């Protein structure tokens, strides 16, 4: 899954600066539904990560049945937090 493809799919644009609050909320809700329906672990992780970047991801125990997936998500969150504290975000 490519970021531009996800942005286009859920927000109908790759430039979020012009997305209305209603369109944004609808896109997030659509992504959350897709996350709930997705069975492929890799795609679920990609969708969860996408939602996490918008502070809209469900809790790890809700999103992932597998402990390995929850641990990968924790690592992802730690990497993002570290990059933000280093001035990268």
Image (cartoon, helix red, strand yellow):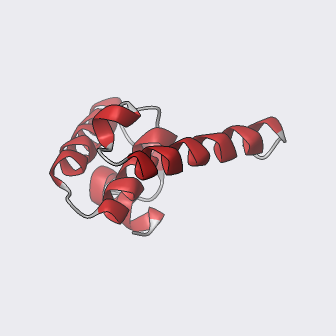
Where does residue 6 sit, x and y in percent of width and height? Answer: 36, 60
Q: Residue at x 29, y 44 (%)?
A: 65
In the image, 65 versus 53, the foreground residue is: 65
Q: Residue at x 42, y 51 (%)?
A: 69
* Percent of width and height locating residue 77: 59, 41
* Front-lying residue, 37 or 7: 37
Question: Residue extending furthest right?
Answer: 86
Q: Quadrant of the C terminus?
A: top right
Which residue sits at x=27%, y=31%? Answer: 22
Q: How many marks?
A: 0
The quadrant holding residue 39 is: bottom left
Pinpoint residue 56: horizontal percent, then vertical percent: 39, 33
Front residue (pair 36, 14): 36
Q: Is residue 82 left or right of residue 47?
A: right
Where is the N terminus found, in terms of image quarters?
bottom left
**Residue farthest front in this picture:** 67
* Figure check: 70 above or below 60: below
Task: Determine whether, in the image, residue 87 is placed left or right of residue 46.
Answer: right
* Residue at the extreme left: 37
Q: Quadrant of residue 27?
A: top left
Residue 69 in view in this figure: yes
Q: Residue 53: percent from the left, percent from the top?
A: 51, 42
Q: Nearer the viewer, residue 32 or 59?
A: 59
Q: Is residue 50 visible?
A: no
| Residue at 44% from the left image edge and 69% from the top image edge | 2
């Amino acid at each position: 899954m490519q970021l531009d493809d996800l942005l286009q799919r859920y927000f109908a644009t790759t430039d979020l600066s012009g997305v209305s609050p209603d369109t944004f909320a609808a896109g997030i809700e659509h992504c959350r539904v897709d996350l709930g329906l997705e069975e492929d672990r890799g795609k679920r992780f990609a969708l969860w990560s996408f939602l996490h970047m918008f502070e809209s991801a469900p809790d790890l125990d809700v999103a992932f049945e597998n402990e390995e997936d929850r641990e990968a998500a924790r690592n992802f969150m730690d990497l993002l937090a570290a990059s933000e504290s280093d001035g990268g975000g």
